[in-house]
Image (cartoon, rainbow, N blue to C red):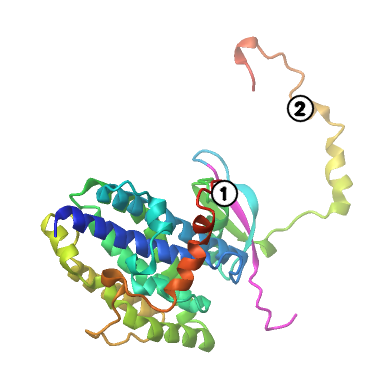
Amino acid sequence: MTKQEALYKYSLRLGDSTLILGHRLSEWCGHGPKLEQDIALINIALDLLGQARSYLSYAAEVEGKGRTEDDLAYHRVERNFHNLLLTERPNDNWGNTIMRSFFFDVFHYYFLSELTKSKDEQLAAIAAKSLKEVTYHVKHNSDWVIRLGDGTEKSHKIMQDAIDELWDYTGEMFDMDEVDETLIKEGIAPDLAPIKDKWLQKVKDVFREATLEMPEVQEWHHTGGKMKGIHSEHMGYILSEMQYLPRVHPDATW
Amino acid sequence: MSVDNKDWPLWEVFIRSKAGLSHKHVGSIHAADYEMALENARDVYTRRSEGVSIWVVESTHIHANSPSEKDPFFDPANDKIYRHPTFYDIPDEVGHI
């Protein structure tokens, strides 16, 4: 695998995960439990969408075939998306949404902290800009995990159920393949193994404060999205909604 | 009042737009406690870089004069023009005050 191929796929994976999670959060627009929380989630969704644009623009540039960020976001089919399966999990309830974001945010924070040291200037710059946003995402969602975990009996149960449902999707964040290895050698991508240790520690600390039970760490976990483009049954619905407008009105502009 | 009232209390939000200026009232939000109030205020009122500092005060802690007392409260000041510094000649060099 050439460095260019690896860099294209790497940027695409990052772009897709931020795009799909951003889209999932945007589904809360107008449905938040309180106006204030509605806005809070949409702010985070917009941050993620902005990050996705940076990654996808860069992927298109690296690919060098004249495609744009919009081509990548709106004119690819499901099998060509490489987001983490975690990011396409349904919103379900508020607790599930918060837990999904919390798992991703903590990973995202430690990951971006390392990516700022990348030898690829563009990725390092995107990471530095995103890190400020993600630092707040971690705070916002950790606060909610603690508030609800250590809240009422009902809220505690909802959060524990969310952990049990989502836990098997967290392992994929730390999987590495040829794409990672090629770029690690070049000093472009960070090794995900030490990031996993930091992630586990932070999740454990927050769960302790939230009086939530930490599941056992297993080798097995769901995979497919990031590396193979094999998705859960939810992905088609996400794309049909997200891609509808540019596909039906190809030249639509504001 | 019903005990299962699930509405969060109301908080008044004050924002300092830049260092050196004072905090100004910008509106109100709902939140369960002061930490959430600060985050909510950040999310609702500083999306376009409006501030460098936020204060939140639970609305029940703010006391206002009653509108029906408006006359005795404010009228006595109306005929005391000597309280306004309008009787002094200000040298041109001073410019606008």
Residue A205 relative to residue B41: left or right: left
In front here: B57 or A58?
A: A58
Q: Which residue is mark 1?
A: B15
Q: Residue A14's x, y, as percent?
A: 31, 61
Q: Residue A40's x, y, as percent?
A: 52, 62
Give the quarter of the image for residue B50: top right
Say which residue appears at 19% left-offset and 61% top-offset: A190
Q: Identify the disc placed on residue B91.
A: none
Q: Which residue is mark 2?
A: B84
Local SS, label 1: strand
Say which residue appears at 34% left-offset and 54% top-offset: A56
> What chain does mark 1 sit on?
B
Label 1: few (<14), some (14–19) or many (≥20) C-alpha neighbours in 10 Å: many
Question: What span is colored magenta in the figure?
Answer: B1-17
**Could you tell me the amino acid type at mark 1?**
Ile
Label 2: few (<14), some (14–19) or many (≥20) C-alpha neighbours in 10 Å: few
Say which residue appears at 57% left-offset and 52% top-offset: B45
